[in-house]
Each structure stands twice: as C-alpha cells, then as structure tokens.
C-alpha cells in the first residue's frame, strides 16, 4: 500500500533555530498536508498544499509541494518553545484517503 | 460553523467486552468520514473511511467494524476487544480540502 517516509524521526534544537523536515512517497498525491499534534489531542492542520511546486507560508511555517508530487517539506523558522510537538505530513490521494507519515517529534530547548 | 464531536474522551474496557465509539459532524453535508488509530508514539493508521451512508471501506483487517447510519454519524465498533485494540482513536472528516480531526478517544483495554 501507499507509504510515506518522514524524516527526521526526532529533533532536539535550541530556541531560535530553524527546523526542516520532509516526507517522500512512492506514490503521487494530489494534496499534501502538514499537521501538528500535541499530547492527548487530535492533529491540527498547519498548512495544506494543492499544486505541484506550490510554496505556502503560515506565519513562521513554510511548506512546499514537490514538483514530482511525491514529496513535501516543512520549515519552521526561529523556533520557540510552543513549537514542541509531533509534526505529521500527510498525502491525500484521488479517493480522498489521507495517508500519514510516521511523524517528527520536535523538542525545543529554551 | 463546522464542528466534529467525538466521544467518549477516554475509555477503559476489559478484554472481550464490546466497543462503540461515536463521531458526529455538524455544519456540513455529505462529508467523507474516517477512523484512524494511533498507537503510543506512532503515526496515524487509517482504519475505515466512508464516502456516504452505508458505504464503508476497510483499510486494515482487524477486530473492528464501522457503520454510518446517518450522513453525519460514523460509529466504530467491536464485538470483543483485544489487548492490541488499545490506542488513540481519531475521527476525521473532509469535503475535499484538508481533514479536520476530532479530539480523539483514548482506549485502554485491560
């Protein structure tokens, strides 16, 4: 079945540093989504990407939909302590199924 | 506005007991509905999805079943729970854009 490879698995960074994480897939997706999940809660949508090559920002977050439609990255600039959490990429196929990556756990050192 | 309700928030059930988790959506019609399971520290695994009333697709063979008796109601069930059914269960909906998740049900089978 479809699988997403998300990396890195975890990151422990200093406050103020930039963060980059990415996802690759063996399948083409029509939409790429990035979510953040805090402990004990459901994922919250951060950025949605609908076109190959699209680059979208949401505050300090920037994400891109790869030209091949098989990859996406998320950057967080000037990290702050509240950025702590697990970040998931997800690809949506033509039948609206959403397949998730395994997550990137981000820890920020004040 | 569109909202998604999921209950209960937490549940502790003995092995062999039945299960019924309910998810309802408000403020939209004919949504695609999904059930995901998340094991501790892991990504989200798609269990079932539904594109309409009584139209259910199963992604993973397992001890669970799903039903959609009404357009905006999605129910996850089991006749006899196993220890391996423990996890964080999330309901989600979409009408073609990004998914919106419920707040989740943490199920512990003892």
Image (spheres, helix red, strand yellow):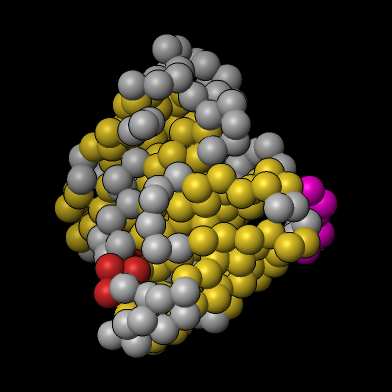
Can see residue B75? yes
- Image quadrant where residue B22 sits: bottom right
- Image quadrant where residue A15 sits: bottom left
The one nearer the camera, B80 or B75, is B80
Q: Residue at x 50, y 40 (%)?
A: A98
Q: Residue at x 54, y 38 (%)?
A: A97
Q: Is residue B25 above or below residue B6?
A: above
Q: Position of residue B12 (x, y in %)?
A: 39, 86
The rendered magenta stretch, by its main secondary structure, is classed as loop
Is A50 positioned to the left or the right of B71 in the image? left
Is B52 positioned to the left or the right of A7 in the image? right
* Residue B19 within the magenta-colored segment of the rendering: no
* Residue B29 within the magenta-colored segment of the rendering: yes
In the displayed orientation, state which residue is furthest to the top. A68
Q: Residue at x 40, y 76 (%)?
A: B80
Q: Quadrant of the C terminus of chain B?
A: bottom left
Q: Quadrant of the N terminus of chain B?
A: bottom right
- Magenta region: B26-32
Can see residue A35? no
């Amino acid at each position: 079945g479809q699988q997403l490879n998300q990396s890195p698995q975890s990151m422990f960074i200093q406050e103020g540093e930039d963060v980059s994480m990415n996802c690759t897939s063996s399948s083409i997706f029509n939409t790429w989504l990035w979510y953040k999940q805090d402990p004990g809660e459901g994922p919250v949508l951060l950025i949605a990407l609908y076109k190959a090559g699209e680059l979208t920002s949401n505050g300090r977050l920037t994400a891109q939909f790869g030209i091949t439609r098989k990859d996406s990255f998320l950057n967080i600039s000037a990290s702050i302590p509240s950025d702590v959490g697990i970040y998931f990429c997800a690809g949506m196929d033509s039948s609206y199924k959403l397949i998730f990556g395994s997550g990137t756990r981000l820890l920020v050192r004040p | 506005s569109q909202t998604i309700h999921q209950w209960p928030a937490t549940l502790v059930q003995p092995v062999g007991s039945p299960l019924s988790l309910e998810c309802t959506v408000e403020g939209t019609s004919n949504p695609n509905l999904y059930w995901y399971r998340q094991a501790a520290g892991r990504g989200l695994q798609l269990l079932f999805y539904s594109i309409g009333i009584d139209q259910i697709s199963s992604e993973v063979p397992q001890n669970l079943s799903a039903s959609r008796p009404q357009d905006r109601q999605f129910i996850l069930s089991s006749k006899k729970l196993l220890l391996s059914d423990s996890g964080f269960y999330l309901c989600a909906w979409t009408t073609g854009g990004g998914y919106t998740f419920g707040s989740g049900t943490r199920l512990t089978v003892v």
